Amino acid sequence: MAQHGKLPVPNFSAGGIATPADAALVMQLGAEAVFVGSGIFKSSDPERRAKAIVKAATFYQDPVKLLEASEELGEAMPGLEISKMSESELMQVRGW
Amino acid sequence: MPDEVRIGVLALQGDFAAHCDALRAAGATPVEVRTAEDLQSVDGLVLPGGESTTMLKLLDAENLFEALVGFGREKSIFGTCAGAILLAKEVVNPVQRSLGLMEMTVERNAYGRQIDSRISKIDIEGHPAEAVFIRAPVIRRAGPDVSVLATYQNTPVLAAEGRHMVATFHPELSGNNTVHSRFVEAVRKLRSAEVTGIARQPYGT
């Protein structure tokens, strides 16, 4: 790993990616692939957002195409405020 | 550098990064290609392994399909696995569109499912080599002008026609750049042939 400056396997990045800009950011940080689940399916227009995120992962070094991909996508996946979550939704109390 | 050979690698999907490394090791300058403009500055092009249906969708989204056909009429393309499927004249299992630049019929997923993927030993014109097959296609029919450079289980796995070459396996994943060197040399020969007018069998050894 030290010799090649990278992992011996591809870096797949996931978790919390909700916008084309998020996908481009992880690509710029060195991800070799991005996968997105709820970021697409909990948005208001999943098909359009999925296409936009694919485009952003391809053209992550092209700011103009990133901007175009980010336009008119509807609402992104809503964030969750931890202090407002019920205890049944908290990870740390599960499984005990 | 007058001797520099710039080889594009279609970078919409698939293992384009591995091809860039292999081309660099073979002495070429790799260029990631995502738009028709990117094709302007390269002497040859690699269509990487990946998923051919996905690549077709992305080619359409970027208006690259016709640009690639035009590029292939003038310059060399090397397709591996999904890239080989894209280059073929005819694709079956299922039938799908392709660039149609090489006279052959390719059957997709011809060895079976992912569990049937394998690493095998092959012989490339007398040189032993490793072939990584990942849900690989099989060349079921090759036209009379297609020269077969390697076979596995009695079907062609490395073949050339005119200025183009295909591998049904993934030479970019073997850490050995002999196949890529062959492509880079062919591109170099064809480029100088544009000046001297000689371009016979660029992939011959």
Image (spheres, coloured by chain):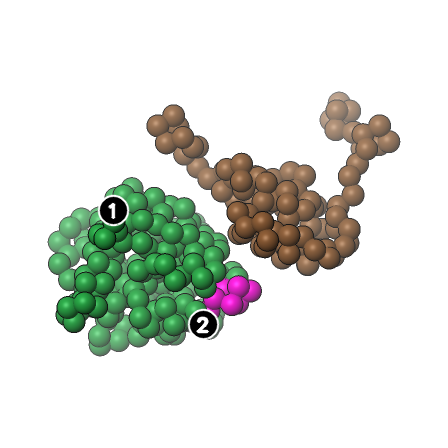
Chain colours: A brown, B green
Image: B162 above or below B131: below
Residue A39 belongs to the span the image colors magenta: no
Q: Is residue B111 left or right of residue B197?
A: right
Residue A14, horizontal then vertical, whole percent: 60, 40
Residue B128, horizontal then vertical, whole percent: 18, 48
Q: Which residue lies at the image location 13% right of the left edge and 58% below the top edge? A: B205
> How many numbered marks are there?
2
Q: What amino acid is labelled 2 in the image?
A: Glu
Q: Quadrant of residue B106?
A: bottom left
Q: Is residue A54 left or right of residue A2?
A: right
Q: Which residue lies at the image location 13% right of the left edge and 54% below the top edge? A: B126
- Circle 1: is it few (<14), some (14-19), or many (20+) Cα within 10 Å? some
A21, B14: nearer the viewer: A21
Q: Is residue B24 left or right of residue B92?
A: left
Residue B2, horizontal then vertical, whole percent: 23, 53
Q: Earlier in the sequence, mark 1 or mark 2?
A: 1
Q: Which type of secondary structure does the marked residue at label 1 adopt? A: loop
Q: Which residues are magenta?
A: B59-66
Q: Which residue lies at the image location 42% right of the left edge and 32% below the top edge? A: A6
Q: Is any part of residue B183 visible from this angle?
A: yes
Q: Quadrant of residue A16?
A: top right
Tag shown at residue B66: 2
